Image: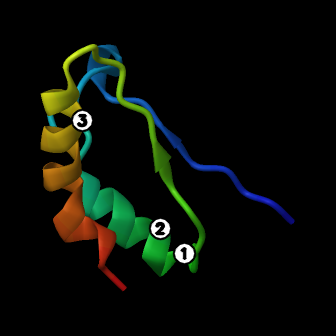
Amino acid sequence: MSISVIIVEKKMSILGWGNINFEKFIAQLNHAGYNETITFEIFSENTNDLLDSREKIAPTATMT
């Protein structure tokens, strides 16, 4: 069975600019036994937005 997780932040912007609590979301996925890849899409022409998003999600990326 294949499960896909798609996360879209408010107005498809930078991670952390919307209403998603990523730490809680990742913790719930872990609790449910999900141990696969999660892909985040960042829609911005500014490459700094991508770097900022990566920094915001990095602390939750290693949660187990």
Give residue 37's position: percent from left, percent from top: 56, 63
Give residue 48's position: percent from left, percent from top: 13, 31
- Asked whether residue 15 appears in the rendered view, the answer is no
The circle on residue 12 is none
Specify the amino acid type for callout 1: Ala
Asked if labels 2 and 1 touch by Cβ distance under 8 angstroms, the answer is: yes
Foreground: 38 or 49? 49
> Which residue was labeled with disc 3?
50
- Name the residue located 51 percent from the left edge and 56 percent from the top edge: 38
**Secondary structure at numbered mark 3:** helix
Q: Which of the two discs, 3 and 2, labels the residue nearer the N terminus?
A: 2
Give me the C-alpha separation between circle 1 and circle 3. Answer: 28 Å
Instruction: Indicate which label's residue lies in the foreground, 3 or 2.
Output: 3
Give residue 19's position: percent from left, percent from top: 21, 33
* Residue 41 as seen in the image, left or right of residue 32: left
- Name the residue located 58 percent from the left edge and 49 percent from the top edge: 5
Asked if labels 3 and 1 touch by Cβ distance under 8 angstroms, the answer is: no
> Which residue was labeled with disc 1?
32
Give me the C-alpha separation between circle 3 and circle 2. Answer: 23 Å
> Which residue was labeled with disc 2?
29
Q: Quadrant of the N terminus?
A: bottom right
Colour mapping used in the image: rainbow
- Name the residue located 23 percent from the left edge and 55 percent from the top edge: 57
Give me the C-alpha separation between circle 1 and circle 2. Answer: 5 Å
Q: Residues within 10 Å of mark 3 (few under 14, many from 20)?
A: some
